[in-house]
Image (cartoon, rainbow, N blue to C red):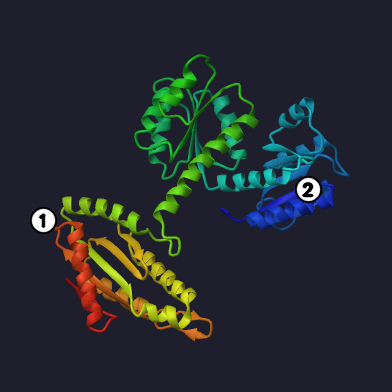
Amino acid sequence: MARPGRVLLVDNSRTFSMVIAAALTDRLEIEVTIADSLGAAARVLDDETGCDNVVLVISGLVLPDAKESEIVAFFTGRDLPLVVLTGTFDTASRERILSHPVIDYVLKDNPSSIDYVVWLVRRIWRNRDMTALVVDHTPSDRAMLSGLLHLYGFTVLEAEDGTQGLTIAETTPRLDLVVTDYEMPGLDGIQLVRRLRIRHPRDRLAIIGLSSSTGAISAQFIKNGANDYLNKAFQPEELFCRIAQNVENIENIASLHALATTDPLTGLRNRRSFFELAQSRFRTLTQSGRPVAVAMIDVDHFKRINDGWGHDCGDRVLIELARVLAETTLDGDVVGRLGGEEFCLLAADLDETSDFFDSLRRTVAALSPRFGDETLHVTISIGVCVRAGDGRADSLRALLTAADRALYNAKRLGRNRVEYA
């Protein structure tokens, strides 16, 4: 999950509480504290940790020591995000519940209620690592939207018009969601969306357009790059569902991208992803006249490790090597696992190339990872090809071929060494 914290679960049914708590603990690994009355919940919130450690409250509306209105007022008065559990549902009940600043309500007698609670809590937890931007010229509407997004767990930024919104978006390191009105002076909502999409594609940033107007505004928002649209007369319940749907679509795309580009064992880039990024990085470096180093890295006697200690041990060695590579390389470097025990690194601006790679070799040799009762002695061989930043570097393929020949020489000359092309 995103960050530490716990759920406070308050209900008069011990059995139902235990089922919900078990589902949250087993599926999400979230700490759950159970209380069977409002008084018990108050004692939990007033202990040493207080409200700070409680991220979300899930509470029934039938408790032995409080009425429905008292229950809702108690938790919302402490600015605690609240999900309501109810055994009955009708239009009057729904309107009464949603008239309060609650996230959502869950029907206890619905067989799928457990799954929905788990999904809801997971969504709130993930939102805590996300930043949303509200762009609206009307202060009351902007405050209302910001309050709802804060209730849903987002870190919320605000802008009073499209120009300010664009500035905030371009200076915020990570932005996950934009909710923007249409009617604004200067840069309107549709123009803002169009400008945002220049640098923030649909699969990286969710944008929801809003307007109190009728007509073709919704289509114009979508055509110009918004992921979704809502009329300003929306219900908070609908806003939450639309936000969750759009944010999860982006998360799903990111997950698929990670599966396609990441080596599942080591977490480094896989072969295809490495070559795609390395080619782009190589082109940028050579065009700017910066020196480039390409290194082929191979675990010595890896087959002997697999045969002698098993593939689990071999996997452990690869994971440790990947960790060292990730920790010793810089953000602009490209590192990946090409397959088996072979890794590749493209680096730039190495002041002392020989010192860097020999230091890497010595770091791996000093690891001595333990596997069961055994201590392993792991070494690597490295072949390096360096080209000066004179703008006349060979192709990346030529550098890789030369580095591979240097790696072969390192193996031939006894392993646990660095050789240069």
Residue occupied by mark 1: 392
In what element is the residue under mark 2?
strand
User: Residue 352 at what x, y percent from top left?
Assistant: 21, 70
| The label number, if any, that marks residue 2 in the structure image | none
210 shown above or below 415? above
* Nearer-the-camera pick, 376 or 329: 376
Which residue is painted at 58% across and 25% down in the image? 140
Q: Which of the two discs, 1 and 2, labels the residue nearer the N terminus?
A: 2
Occupied quadrant, residue 22: bottom right
Crowdedness of circle 2 by 10 Å Cα count: few (<14), some, many (20+)?
many
Q: Amino acid at mark 1?
A: Arg
50 shown above or below 229? below
* Nearer-the-camera pick, 192 or 85: 85
User: Residue 239 at what x, y percent from top left?
Assistant: 59, 31
* Quadrant of image for the C terminus: bottom left
* Residue found at the far top of this picture: 215
Can residue 353 be seen at all in this image of the molecule?
A: no
* Nearer-the-camera pick, 380 or 243: 380
| The label number, if any, that marks residue 10 in the structure image | 2
User: Residue 177 at what x, y percent from top left?
Assistant: 49, 37
* Quadrant of image for the N terminus: bottom right
184 shown above or below 52? above
